[in-house]
Image (cartoon, helix red, strand yellow):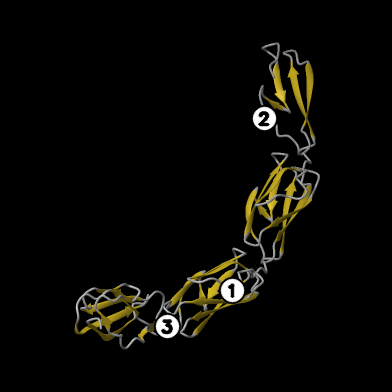
Amino acid sequence: ARAQDNGASVSINGQPTTSQSVALGAPGSNTPIQVEVTAPNGNQKTYVVNVNRAALGGNNNLQSLTVSPGPLVPAFAAGTTSYTVDVANSVTNVTVTARAQDAGATVSINNQTTTSLSIPLGAAGSNTPIQVEVTAPNGNQKTYVVNVNRAALGGNNNLQSLTVSPGSLAPPFTANQRRYTVNVDSTVASVLVTAQPQDAGAVVSINDQTTTSLSVPLGAAGTNTQIDIDVTAPNGSQKTYTVVVNRAAPIPPPTITTTSLPNGNVNTFYSQQLQATGGSGNLIWTFTGSLPDGLSMDAAGLISGTPTTAGGASPFTVQVTDALQQSDTQDLSIEIFNAP
């Protein structure tokens, strides 16, 4: 405060000064300040300034509230204090973020003074309540509650697919069919089993090995091998699929049943089919040695042609071989005579 007359004196709240810092009362109160001016002749005038300090704010609303992963149900509104959030059973914690409308208000989440907090959830299938408290500058409080529902563990213990290679399932795969057979050749010593669950959280084991793909050795030819596929759902329930692999009995090697051949005559057409039993697939015939002049043998075992020269018995050896490279041999001969 400055006086008009340089000779006058000024006091503020009883203290001779022209400038003073004055402490105010509590929020919501009035503080009167007296400024006295004394003229050189002693005359006084008092000025009064009433300082009204505003009361503390009572805004205890949230400006925003989010839960991640979410969303909130219902959608956030400052006047709504109760919410739910549904999350998958794989979610083990959520992050809650809350902002107050009044910058002077205080936010606490589960009794921790913060505007953002990661909160661990209870076990799958449980509910976790989260409290968000907003304290206005004047001390008024409001509590928002978020109930986080963590989904229960799934009970899906079905297979999505099941294959065996080589071979094909009988009957064809369906999730509800639990027993199958597979027929393979006698030469197949192992099969590859591949199984995928419908629920990505389920666990698959093949013959007690935790895996979705396994090479399984088979028993000897002519035996069957049982393969068990266990599917354990996230909630622990189990289902077992069974595949029985029938390995065919071994195929006996071919046996030549032609033990002798008729003789022939010069200039007379000759034809004899060699015979064999057993074997696998097509039989291929070959020979070593010499056939009589004019005769030949094809791969099917047919000896044919027109002999051109008479002579004593011509010895040769025939061999038959099957698709599995199993074989048999037989010594034969043909004698050619002059025509009668």
Number of dots carrying numbers = 3
- Which of pointers 1 and 2 indicates the residue nearer the eye? 1
Q: Is residue 256 visible?
A: yes
Residue named by callout 1:
170
What is the x, y in percent for residue 205?
54, 74
Quarter of the image that includes the N terminus? top right
Q: CA distance from mark 1 to mark 3?
A: 23 Å
Q: Residue flagged by tag 2: what amino acid is it?
A: Ser
**Residue bearing mark 3:** 251
Identify the residue at the far bottom of this view.
259
Which mark's residue is nearer the viewer, 1 or 3?
A: 3
Relative image position of residue 204 (x, y in whole percent): 56, 71
Tell me the SS state at disc 2.
loop
Residue that badge 2 annotates: 21
The residues bearing labels 3 and 2 have C-alpha atoms spaced at a distance of: 114 Å
Q: Position of residue 248 (x, y in %)?
A: 47, 81
Q: Residue furthest front?
A: 340
Is residue 176 left or right of 301 when viewed as pictured? right
Q: CA distance from mark 1 to mark 2?
A: 97 Å
Residue under the point 74% across and 48% down: 134
- Foreground residue among 96 and 198: 198
Looking at the image, which residue is at 75% across and 44% down?
136
Q: Are marks 1 and 3 in contact (CB under 8 Å)?
A: no
